[in-house]
Image (cartoon, rainbow, N blue to C red):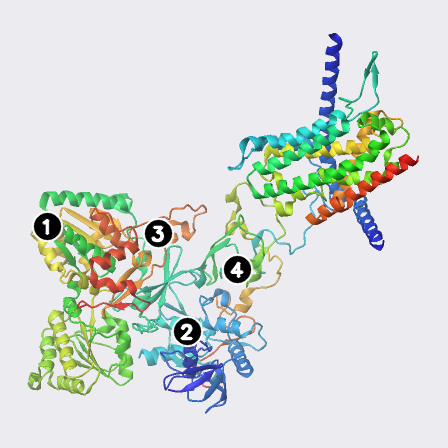
Amino acid sequence: MPDLIIDNKKIQVAKGTRVIDAAQSAGIYIPRFCYFAELGAVGACRVCAVKFIDGPVEGIEMSCMVEAEDGMVVSTDDAEAVDFRRHVIEWMMMNHPHDCPVCDEGGHCLLQDLTVAGGHGIRRFSGKKRTYADQYLGPLISHEENRCIQCYRCSRFYQEYCGYKDLGVMGIAQRIYFGRYKDGVLENPFSGNLIDICPTGVYTDKPSRYTGRKWDFEQSSGVCTTCSLGCSIRVSARYRQVVRLEAGYSQAVNGAFICDRGRYGFSWVNSEKRPRQGRVDKKTMAPQKAAAAAAGRINDLEKQYGPGAIAVAGSGRSSLEALAAWHHLCQIRSWRGFFFDDLAAGPGAAAAVSGLSRENAVSMKAVESADMILAVGADPLREAPMLALAMRQAWRAGAGVFAIDPRDLEWPFAFRQVSAAADEIPGLVSGMATGNGFFENDSRHGRNMAAIRDQLAQSRSPVIVCGTAAGGQATVSAAAGLVQWLRKSKKDARLFGILPMANTFGGILLNGKPGTPEELIKGMESGQIKALVAAQSDLWKTCQDPDRLDRALRRLEFLCAADCVATELVSRADIVIPVFSVFEAGGIYINQEARAQWSQPAHAGGTPVRITGAGGHPPRVIGAAIPGGGLPPAWLAAWQIAGLAPPDSHEAMMDWMTKAYPVTAPVKTMGSEGVRIFPSQ
Amino acid sequence: MGLWLTGYAILMFKIGVILTGVLLLAAYLVLLERKLLGRFQARIGPNRAGIFGLLQPIADGIKLLAKEDVMPRGAHRRIFLFAPAVVTGTALLTFAVVPMGPDLHLGGRKIPMVVTDMNVGLLYVFAMASLSVYGVVLGGWASDSKYAMLGSIRGAAQMISYELALGLSIVPVVMLAGSLSLVDIVQAQAGRPFVLVQPLAFVIFFVSAMAESKRIPFDLPEAEAELGSGYHTEYSGMRFGMFFLGEYVQIQVLGALTAVFFLGGWRGPFLPGPLWLLAKIVLVVTAMIWIRATLPRFRYDQLMDLGWKFLIPAALINIVITGFVMVGI
Amino acid sequence: MRKWVWIVHSLCTGFYTTLKHIFRGPATELYPEYKRPLPARSRARIILTADPDGRERCVACYLCSAACPVDCISMQAAENQQGRRYAAWFRINFGRCIYCGLCEEACPTSAIQLTPSFEHADRDIMKMVAEKADLQVNHCGKDGNYNFYDHAGVADAFRPKGGHANEAPPVNVRTNMP
């Protein structure tokens, strides 16, 4: 544990900590362009120079390249160091264009900040500026190479961290160029992070080009609801429209990056088709009135056919609050039940949830330090992309990666695959645990399975990643069994289940055994279910046989949809109640690791000005009422549809939920990293 | 019977003429003050209503009449409504004893150019001046506002203090004239105005008169910078107008009294008596405006020092000296 | 005694000074009859000027709206046919504007400028809300020859990369020649 002094502060840090990080842990920010904790240090930009006054190293050195050692005395504000940094910035600005006003990075640009902080205002160099031709990098990222300061962050991220080769550095001397060999769409599904890590405006966000400056945005820290990982995101909204998502920082989940699916998969929020007005039999009205109408019809049907004729379909798109509300209402009204779409998308989800415990759960960040990873029926790159990136980091650190999967997998790192059929997988996995060893005689998988077993035997902290979609319940149970067996043999084995939706865990946690969509469809076909409430349900999307679903839906007497997305069910519904999405109402989401996280609302809600105003022009006279505003959050709509008096605020809702479902009690005390909730608690 | 009626008719006529004249003059003194102040400050002054702004007082009057009459919620209704009338009324009543000119002989009748020639006219003047303090105190108290209250307390203290000096400064005049009647005092100045024999009394009287009328540099009761507007902070519309009018009538009264006591009243060559009086009033008021344009407001302790430690002793000494001189002669 | 001399002397000086003013004549002007010519840098009605070549100067960088202490400027940036950033709409609420000139100071392209024209009060507040068309003029205002795009180094339909003031032609990354 080296002891050192930085700016007269005594600091003790772990061995191997770089001086730049040691300073940051003491609250001293040393400027940097090339250094990025996740990407490591290369010492390319020279702007983190500090003065080493005493100790093993002396003089001006790059703080990112020197590891902290005992007896070091460092000064970050030594006149010599400050002067050095000032000159570094000045020479970087020699070729930097004069285009901050038209650059989207302006306002949250590291180079801009440090140039201002360094006091470099007037260009002294009178020579010509170097220029570069830009490239087309696809519809998501614009490229303006003139602005580059050669920090190498992009090429290091792209090639080393992600393992994709189509963007990199070329040229020599004064002509270093970061880009592709030729124009073309970037292949890396994490390429959006280039925008975040670029310290200046070489890579900028194309969909939100010129939409606004950072200071004009309403910003919130949210949770990505695109997959079950629950990555942290920064949401920027302007004029009632979500403009841009950026990676948030989460020590336990995603670190500093997010995938492109999460970054760009939000266009539905701003969609013109999104339901924004209540609808009763093709007549539009206020959402509250539509909900009251729905409550009336459900009451009538309940009187006519009994409560068993009413069903609710929901999905893991909903927040924990909404799921709790629906589950509770189904129970107290003795309705037929709450049917969970996610069980169609991930048949193994229930097993993945019940198999998880405080001991064997693993955060995505911890996957990076596993020494062996076995993916069972899982394709992280498609189902939970950031997990693939975490697995790559483990692989870079020397972990062996194995996959047992029938599909043709393509991951950005080397791995060994056992191409077993889906129904073979449970046997192969549990075979390792039970030690049957039958696969020694298996001509197809024998050798590979033996390799996996040997590797497992050598490993100390293996992670078993299992998908819930392809393998189904048996695979998940087998994987959970394997983890249990490994833990019994004194290994720190962990289970990482990939769930189909952002809040699948929450739905199953509250309910234990929610109804499956199959049961729901059967109920509708048999005519027992007369009324269906589709509460943010993706039934149509997850159903394998749309024709059958279509026929089943036609037998219903009443279909009500409460949703923030224009789904097929919404367009078919007799009564539509529009609700606020997670960006407007916020919500709690529980990821696959049982980590409940609060997603902050980004703005107050309402139809985007882009849609309400002519050409995005806000009205000249602005009234107090927000057009398209005042929709209920999903949980509130649940109460309204049930015709009961709802809790009168989100706080009251949380109080109610933690009392009605004691398992959710920890959410009241969760911090910025969330809190883990296990079903066994 | 007929004689009696004619007497009344003449009296009423006199009162009517004086009231009209005084109110009209008050309005135009405002204009004079604004115009003069403008020139003192290198500005133009009001010039939009009529030529040279001559209709400005009428415009102001209409404006004040048309304004909403606001009363604070906690105000004492009756006193609040009554107070402005006290200020204006007492000021107007003082004019009853001011002689406007020599007696007029009309159709064998002797018509004195004064509403009433009281033998204790001087005491009457001071009685009225004392009563006007009530208007200020009641108005400030009834407003239920701390600014108004502080203003009225200051006003009461200041007016009572300076009334002493005012009264004492007149004693030598009374001694010289040998009468308390204002008509007699004017008569006594037939040879030379008293300002020549009693310059010190004149200065004391003039300074005290300015303090009585609460004008800059003695405007502590309505000091804008610290009290909003002092005792009439809460008044608006014509009720504020009454305070305003009262102040200017008071200035006239004090101008007239200065003229009567020291400048020979209506006496003067060539012109008829009333015009001389008018000219002297305007002269005194112009001097007051000049002082207003020049001097800043007193501090409270300076105000009290000046009144009690300087003006009153000086007035007393003046009385003693006058007495000695008179006995000596 | 000296004190008294001083008192009388200073009183006389004061009264003499004020008296002098009476004969000095007014320094003020009668406003609507006589309009004093204002200096070019007086701060009143805001305009959006044009480049010397007649094109729109404003690049909708949002700096004026950020600098505005009363939040009276709003706009939306967009990209036009020529690849230039411009304001799709631009609005100044003169009912709110305090004419402080911070927007003009913040403007990197000399587009937004304050002019001496101050007579635009109106009883209808909506007439005080100026849109882009109300603000645009076809001259350069106070800054006669500055053209942001000469220096910015961004390629557009009018000039390619490397075609701006003090720029070298684009680098050929595929050569190893020094």
What percent of the width, then of the height, locates residue B122? 77, 29
**How would you rate the neighbour count of disc 2 (Cα within 10 Å): few for under 14, some for 14-19, many for 20 or more?**
many
**What is the number of the mark on residue C67?**
4
Dot in front, 4 or 2: 4
- Amino acid at pointer 4: Ala
Among numbered discs 3 and 2, the one appearing first in the sequence: 2
- Amino acid at pointer 3: Thr
C-alpha distance separating marks 4 and 2: 26 Å
Dot in front, 3 or 4: 4
C-alpha distance separating marks 3 and 2: 33 Å
The chain that hosts pointer 4 is C
Residue on which disc 1 sits: A308
- Amino acid at pointer 1: Gly
Residue on which disc 2 sits: A198
Residue on which disc 3 sits: A607
On the image, which quarter does residue A587 sit in? bottom left
The chain that hosts pointer 3 is A
Dot in front, 2 or 1: 1
What percent of the width, then of the height, locates residue B119? 78, 24
Kindly check if marks 3 and 4 are in contact, taking CB atoms under 8 A apart as contact. Answer: no
Q: Secondary structure at mark 3?
A: loop
Q: In this rendering, would B219 be left or right of C61?
A: right
**What is the number of the mark on residue B153?**
none
Dot in front, 1 or 4: 1
C-alpha distance separating marks 1 and 4: 62 Å
On the same chain, marks 3 and 1? The answer is yes
- Amino acid at pointer 2: Cys
> Of C97 and B103, which appears nearest the observer?
B103
